[in-house]
Every structure is written in C-alpha cells, then in structure tokens.
Image (cartoon, rainbow, N blue to C red):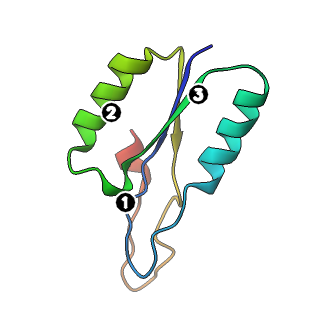
C-alpha cells in the first residue's frame, strides 16, 4: 500500500517543530513493508502545488494528515488549525 503522509504545520513562532509524530508513523509503516513518502509543508512556498506534485508522483492508496495541534492553546490570541486540514 503506497502511503503519503503530509505535515500541515507552518507555525514558525519561536522554534519550528519537527514533525515527529508523522515520522514515527512513517517508520512503523516502512517497517511493515509499505512504501511511504513524507511531505512537510513547513517551508513550502506553494503548498497546494507541493501536495499536487506529491499526489502525482506517489499515487498513494492512503493519505495521512499530520496536525501539530488542534488549536493554538493561547487564550489571548486563539487560533483553530483543523479547518486547514479539511
């Protein structure tokens, strides 16, 4: 089963976070014999173009979406990140 995993996090405040959860899932999938490609959108200028290219190249049977947080956890400047995943 061809798998494409996409990390949506683009929050660069203070320190950009590594997509550790996505890489952990990718490692387990590979260990079980599945070809996996990871796409980290953190530094992509053209997010949609990068996703379209990856879909064309990988032709995945399964696409996984990695979200760092569901919200900003900041009561003073709240932000919800789930609509972007949709």
Q: What residue appears at the point 27 percent right and 43 percent down from the top-left corner?
A: 47
Label 2 CA crowd tier, 10 Å (few <14, some 14–19, many 20+): some
Q: What residue appears at the point 37 percent right and 71 percent down from the top-left corner?
A: 12
Figure quadrant of residue 18: bottom right
- 21 relative to 12, above or below: above
Find residue 21 and report its horizontal and vertical position in percent.
Answer: 64, 51
**Nearer to us: label 3 or label 2:** 3
| Dot 3: element | strand
- Spatial CA distance of label 2 from label 1 is 14 Å
Q: Nearer the viewer, residue 69 or 52?
A: 52
Who comes first in sequence, dot 3 or dot 2?
3
Q: Where does label 1 land, which residue?
A: 10
Find residue 56 and report its horizontal and vertical position in percent.
Answer: 33, 17
Q: Where does label 2 land, which residue?
A: 51
Quarter of the image for the C terminus: give it: top left
| Dot 1: element | loop
Q: What residue appears at the point 71 percent right and 38 percent down from the top-left corner?
A: 27
User: Viewed as shown, does residue 62 lie left or right of 82?
Assistant: right
Quarter of the image for the N terminus: give it: top right
Q: Where does label 3 land, which residue?
A: 36
User: Viewed as shown, does residue 3 lie left or right of 13?
Assistant: right
Find residue 53 and report its horizontal and vertical position in percent.
Answer: 29, 26
Q: Are marks 2 and 1 in contact (CB under 8 Å)?
A: no
Find residue 83 and report its horizontal and vertical position in percent.
Answer: 37, 48
- Spatial CA distance of label 1 from label 3 is 21 Å
Q: Nearer the viewer, residue 84 or 37?
A: 37
Label 3 CA crowd tier, 10 Å (few <14, some 14–19, many 20+): many
- Spatial CA distance of label 3 from label 2 is 15 Å
Return the mark for residue 68: none
| Dot 2: element | helix
């Amino acid at each position: 089963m061809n798998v494409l995993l996409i990390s949506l996090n683009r929050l660069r405040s203070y320190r950009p976070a590594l997509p550790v959860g996505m890489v952990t899932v990718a490692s387990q999938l590979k260990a079980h014999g599945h070809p996996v490609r990871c796409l980290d959108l953190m530094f992509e200028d053209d997010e949609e173009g990068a996703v379209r290219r990856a879909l064309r190249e990988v032709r995945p049977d399964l696409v996984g979406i990695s979200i760092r947080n569901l919200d900003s956890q900041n009561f003073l400047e709240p932000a919800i990140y789930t609509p972007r995943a949709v």
